Amino acid sequence: MDVRSQISMVFHLDKCIGCHTCSIACKNVWTDRKGTEYMWWNNVETKPGTGFPTKWEDQREYRGGWELDEDGNLRLKSTSRARIVPNIFHNPHMPSMDDYYEPWTYKYEDLFNAPEGDDQPTAIPISKVTGNPMSIEAGPNWDDDLGGSPVYAANDPNLEGLTPQEREQLFAIERLVFFYFPRICNHCLNPSCVASCPSGALYKRGEDGIVLIDQKVCRAWRSCVAACPYKKTYFNWQTGKSEKCILCFPRLETGQAPACFHSCVGRIRYLGVMLYDAERIEEVAKLPPEQMIEAQRDMLLDPNDPDVIRQARANGVHDSVIEAAQRSPVYQFVKLWKIALPPHIEWRTLPMLFYVPPLLPVMSRREGETIASTTDSFFHPVEQARAPMSYLASLLGGGNTGHVTYALRKQMAVRLYRRSRTVGDVDEAVLADVLREADTTEAECEAIYRLTALCTFDERFVIPPAHREEAIEMMKEPHEHRQSAGFGFLAGPRRGS
Amino acid sequence: MTTLHRTLIAAALLAGLVATSRPAAARDPVADDFRQSCSSCHTIGGGRLTGPDLKGVGERRDPEWLIRFVLDPGAVIDAGDPTALELLATHNNVRMPAVAGMTRARAEALLALVARESQLDKSQFQGLAMSTRPFTPADVARGRELFLGTASLANGGGSCMSCHACGQLPLAGGGRLGPDLTKVFERYADRKTLGAWLSAPATPTMAPTFRDRPLEVETEVLPLVAFFEHASRTAQEEQGRTPLTLFFLLSAACTGALLALGGRVWGRRFRAVRRPLVRAASWSGRGRGPAPSERSSS
């Protein structure tokens, strides 16, 4: 057992209102520099939809993530020793600027400087790359309102496994289904971006598992852009370096939640530290996709287990980190309650950002003067949810509907339990049946309810102390570092250095 | 290849060959000089070839004029000398080339030799004694082999194709250093003249090459003349399909083949994702409301 710690996240999709506050918070903090205009380290997508960049989930196009070779070993889909030489100047499967979008602003001064005339002056769009007038064809959330248009929503790769009836229902007028899907870097346990970098610029921080790109080492190969199946590394065309979500590590190190977590209006985001067994990464990443969710959950360790604590200490994990892991909300969602699931685990990167699948309201529509519903009871059966189980399973279940159904059934049980407590019109016998079917107890329902609906700031974000002094100690004498840090010249990243 | 290159190569060949050929020219240097430099166009008492018969030329012309003309024929013609212009007109407008390395002493020696030989009844420079039998297809085939270099020349000369093109040759055709020889038989008008030229080529490039490696008259000159005669005849029949057009056709075919191969290898490469989606949707959505790109967006 090789116990390590990892900062891990849970996004509760049932609570996301798609307001994009997280995206704007991130953009204002990190990516409003020249060359980063098109980057959205945090973005919110409408599902079904093709997302950003367009169809990022289609790995037949982008070839991100890992696959198993003939001998059952892991290999990158994007490149190999043989393929890197003929493609040395250009990674063939990268999204083009059009697949992201050409960033633009408007020529606002025209509104003030236009000569007097019969027409109202307008501000024309100007490309932020070339500075020339342009016609806007796409954006990071293009055309995805209310489930999106036939162009974008209908091409969601997750829809491939659906029957034609299910598809038709998904997009039928007054029945259409959509939910929001906020995305940041997953800070994977088996990151393909790190594996692909020819310069060795990417690394996974030992103390908290945050995946970073060293701006001094990056040499613009862009292998990480091609290799990341979530397309969460971006190339800065100004500095000639790739950049990605840094999980606001300067904020984490000072005990603050990352900007997107902190600003989240729906309070859908949870952050905490997890202990895991690094020895099992390769073994789990090689499993068939339908077994991987269970295996990854198994790889995450119980921070209260004395054996785990002993091994963690032996590996240099600080007691305060172990203590934070014991209070981690992520541990409860993922390991105890099993209602948070990793996105697209079949790409074998073992993402450490988990999603609670959305429990969409019962389907009802107006028929003449009455409201027609698909079910007689107040809470409909999970199987009749408007989003087909196979769709959610493709996104969050590794193709296995069991995990998604389990998570939704448990959430439904929590609602029924709360109704019985607040309204009191639920028969105790029925409640007991539902709880048993959902593999839960009243105590667990209460805990889920509290962490979902009544959670405080400190319950949502259990940030372990960064212990920078320990990290520094490994590299150099801390007192010497203290005397030299913060003195000298700062040079920003630029091409050729 | 630039003119400079050609000159340099010719000079290099010349220097090397002159150096090795000294001992061979021991008998009568002036006669040898005439044979190599003059006999390809002139006879002494053997009738007219490309240039006039030189028998008794010393009596017909002013000696000083002769020396001036031999030293630099082009200058005399360009100066508008009436005798020279008349000669040019009567000789098919072929200008006598300047002989490389001609000096006044050498010209005088050569003219003295012409005067001496003119006295004889039967000069040794009466022209090439080549058989006058009609050419056979075997001659043409042999000539073609010699031209292509598949049969080597007895005295070790280089094959014609190294520097010349002629009619339709396999692959990329002949060399481009010397002129195209397809119509050479027509230009020289008869086999005797062409044969005489071949027996002692006098151009600055060919002279040093073939000075010590002359062609055998019956077994090499005759088949080559037969080949050139045949080439000139067939070229008239197949006008328009010169090796150059074949070369371009071949290039176009190879380019096409390479492009097809490239298309096969890289045809399914990653191009774009979003644009094809939009295009496909706008096609299938024709006639059903506004195109997707015209709808409102977020």
Image (cartoon, rainbow, N blue to C red):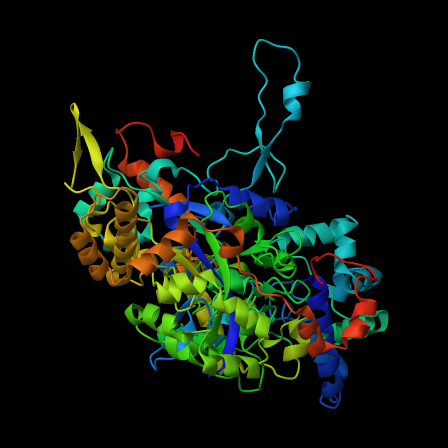
Residue A332 x/y as whole percent = 41, 63
Indicate the quadrant containing the N terminus of chain B: top left, top right, bottom left or bottom right.
bottom right
Q: Say if A277 sits above or below A421 in the image.
A: below
Please indicate, yes or no, whether residue A377 appears anywhere in the rendered image.
yes
> Which residue occupies the foreground of this view, B5 or A52?
A52
> Which residue occupies the foreground of this view, A73 or A321?
A321
Residue B97 x/y as whole percent = 70, 62
> Which residue occupies the foreground of this view, A45 or A149?
A45
Q: Say if A385 sits above or below B209 in the image.
A: above
Q: Residue at x 48, y 43 (%)?
A: A140
Q: Which residue lies furthest to the top in this view?
A: A118
Residue A482 x/y as whole percent = 79, 68
> Which residue occupies the foreground of this view, A454 or A152?
A454
Residue A461 x/y as whole percent = 52, 57
Q: Residue at x 59, y 57 (%)?
A: A243
Q: Where on the picture, by quarter, is residue A230?
A: bottom left
Indicate the quadrant containing the C terminus of chain B: top left, top right, bottom left or bottom right.
top left
Q: Which residue is drawn at 60% across and 56% down?
A: A248
